[in-house]
Amino acid sequence: MKIFVDTNIFLDVLFNRNDAVNVTRILNACHQKRFEGYVADITLLNIDYVAAKQTKNLRDFLALINQTFTVIGANNRIFESALGIDHNDLEDVVQYLCAENETCRVIVSNDKKFYRGKMEVMNSTEFVKDYLV
């Protein structure tokens, strides 16, 4: 099953916040290839920007994400579609459309305001309960 993992999931692990135990289970399941994990290219950049001053060996963590997940990006068509959607977080909409373009089945995000379209968006606790228990 293809899943898209939002940036905040990785930050939850790095900063040991919000359900880091379940987040770690999800990331390990992707690493073990139980799921096909996808992330947006901006996820790696955002993690680097947010965590660089607070985390040692961040490049090793980013390398692990790059090895474990398929990194995908937006194109003109996706941005055109995203700009036509009324939502206050363009980044979320772009990530959603990238995941949809790759036919991901679920988006895992602990952002309560993450854009919700037709694809299922679950937080880490819900995902573990439904797919890893």
Image (cartoon, rainbow, N blue to C red):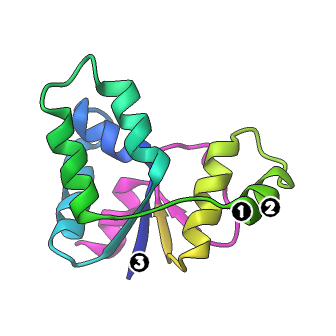
The three-letter code of the residue at mark 2 reads Ser
In whole angstroms, how far apart are the C-alphas of marks 2 and 3?
Answer: 22 Å
Tell me which corner region of the image, top left, top right, bottom left or bottom right, holds residue 67. bottom left
Tell me which corner region of the image, top left, top right, bottom left or bottom right, holds residue 79. bottom right
Residue stretch rendered in magenta on the structure: 108-133
Q: Which numbered circle lies on residue 2?
A: 3
- Residue 113 within the magenta-colored segment of the rendering: yes
Counting other residues with Cα less than 10 Å from the Cα at mark 2, is it few (<14), some (14-19), or many (20 or more)? few
- Residue 17 within the magenta-colored segment of the rendering: no
Q: In the image as oriented, which residue stretches furthest toward the top? A: 53
**56 versus 73 height, above or below:** above
Identify which residue is drawn at 41% across, 77% down: 2
CB within 8 Å, label 1 to label 2: yes
**22 versus 130 height, above or below:** above
- In this rendering, position of residue 66 left or right of residue 9: left
The three-letter code of the residue at mark 3 reads Lys
> Is residue 104 or residue 17 the one in the foreground?
104
Q: Nearer the viewer, mark 1 or mark 3?
A: 1
CB within 8 Å, label 2 to label 3: no
Residue 22 at least partly seen: no
Q: Which numbered circle lies on residue 78?
A: 1
Q: Position of residue 49 (x, y in %)?
A: 40, 27
Q: Which image quarter holds the C terminus?
A: bottom left
Q: Which numbered circle lies on residue 3?
A: none
In whole angstroms, how far apart are the C-alphas of marks 1 and 2?
Answer: 5 Å
Q: Which residue is mark 2?
A: 81
Identify which residue is drawn at 60% across, 72% down: 100
CB within 8 Å, label 1 to label 3: no
- In this rendering, position of residue 75 left or right of residue 104: right
The three-letter code of the residue at mark 1 reads Ile
Q: Secondary structure at mark 1?
A: helix
Earlier-in-chain disc, 2 versus 3: 3
